[in-house]
Amino acid sequence: MKKFFFILFFSAFCNFLHSQHDVSLELLTKHVYTLADDAMRGRYAGSSEGYQAALYIEKQFEEIGLTPFENTDFLQAFYLTNNKKCHNIIGIIEGKDSLLKNEYIIIGAHYDHLGYKFINDKIDVYNGADDNASGVATLIELARTLKKKENELKRSVIFAAFDAEEIGLLGSRYFSKQIPANKVKLMISLDMVGYLKQSKKLYVKGVANIENIKNLIKNIPFPQSSTIVLQNYETSILYATDTESYAKLGVPTLHITTGMKSPYHTTKDDADKIDYEGLMTITNFMIDLIDTLAKQNYLSPSGKKAHKNRGLAPFQAGLILNIGSNAGVLQKTAFHSTKLGFAIAAGPYMQINTKRIAIRTEVLYENKTFSFPQQINYTSKPIKITSQAITVPVSLLLISNLIEDSFYYYAGIGGFYTYNFHGKNAGKRMDFNKDINHHEGGIQSSIGFSAYKVNIGVTFRRSLSPTIINTPSVKNRSVYFSIGYSF
Ligand SMILES: [Zn+2]
């Protein structure tokens, strides 16, 4: 607490030196300390402490005099699949131009974080001061100043504190469906803006999404101690913020952040480490930016999109289920193949996509059966052989043009390795010294299509190495119908 008061004193002093727009360092500090307090228990989406955080933000919006979106309530409830209730807090300053007020600029900052954990029966809280109490504090104070100059704003500006970002950008996705995408001229996410002093950089990511914005930003004053880094696109496939919910709808977006300087997603992301002066600098910058953008006669999308928002994600992972049949092919005898048996294989897969080519790797638990004559001349009844194995196929997929942003056909070739670890031969436990080889390998081909998160196809697999010991002419061959789901 001592530190807190020191910062307040210090901040009042700096406020006097720096401020261009009467941004209160004291309030910025108070918001971060309140939201990132241990009492908020890490603001997990759907938790009662998350709701307390929502009420705090609601109170700020109310005091500032924002209007609840569509005149209902600042708090917008939505539900998780486990029925837990989450809340976005949405306020608006309506534009003053009779036409342009129907165009929206949305500024979002998620307020949820990761909750808490127990270490040796002691609670350890993910306070999420940088991620993202910093963004919410900036959002609130930005709203306060813009409300005072609302008569200058032609476009409508929406302030959105989003819930459930950390568990899948759910709050922003929920709200993105409430305004037709073509009316949203720009969506900005303030996410992790608390480390300006350490990073010396304020990143503005996505400037290629919107016409002329680079020039507009260059004219905004910014202290010389740090630089504004303009990045054309958000490129990281590992890190996503609420912009993604809008980018997927074709809305131009900007992610504003001081980068990954904080103890990201650890329990050390605390309020005393935040650069509050930096928050003030960023709030001042945001005021100028929104003021400028809300006044422009035209705010047009460039039509350019980040690769990761062009429909096909660069990285996919999911689960795949294969159901089909298996047989041993007899190559040097009169019989074409053994009797068919049932085969099933299931497991996780991952796929790396480029524009035309993808690489897919699967790790499958496989269960195959086939019937095999005890003697090659088929005088006795065939016996049933089953084997359980781990199979790892790797294939190169040629993919078609995207239809409707997420539908494509594919054709693939590749190879696989199988490790048979258990099996039965005529009901008896398989003897890996006598009956079946542990190791198998071969080639495979596949065709199919992918639509949104689902892919459906047919896979042909053929062993090049013998399945049965001492009978090199018997090689497995399987055909699978496969269905995959990517997360
Ligand atoms: Zn975040």
Image (cartoon, rainbow, N blue to C red):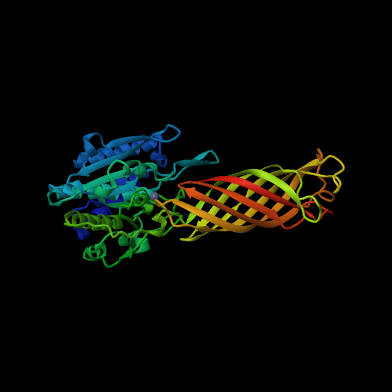
Q: Nearer the viewer, residue 229 or 268?
A: 229
Residue positioned most to the front: 334
Task: Pinpoint residue 469: horizontal percent, then vertical percent.
Answer: 82, 53
Q: Is residue 218 left or right of residue 133?
A: left
Q: Residue at x 43, y 55 (%)?
A: 402
Res 480 seen here: yes
Q: Residue at x 63, y 54 (%)?
A: 393
207 or 229, which lies in front? 207
Q: Quadrant of residue 233?
A: bottom left
Q: Quadrant of residue 126?
A: top left
Question: Relative to residue 94, is residue 229 drawn left or right?
Answer: right
Question: Percent position (x, y) of residue 193?
Answer: 34, 55
Residue 155 location in percent, x, y? 18, 50
Quadrant in which residue 176 is drawn:
top left
Position above or below: 476 against 212: above
Residue lying at the far bottom of the rendered structure: 224
236 on left or right of 380: left
Judge from the rendering whether residue 50 lies leftward or rightward of residue 95; answer left or right: right
Residue in view at x 26 percent, y 37 percent: 74
Q: Residue at x 16, y 50 (%)?
A: 100
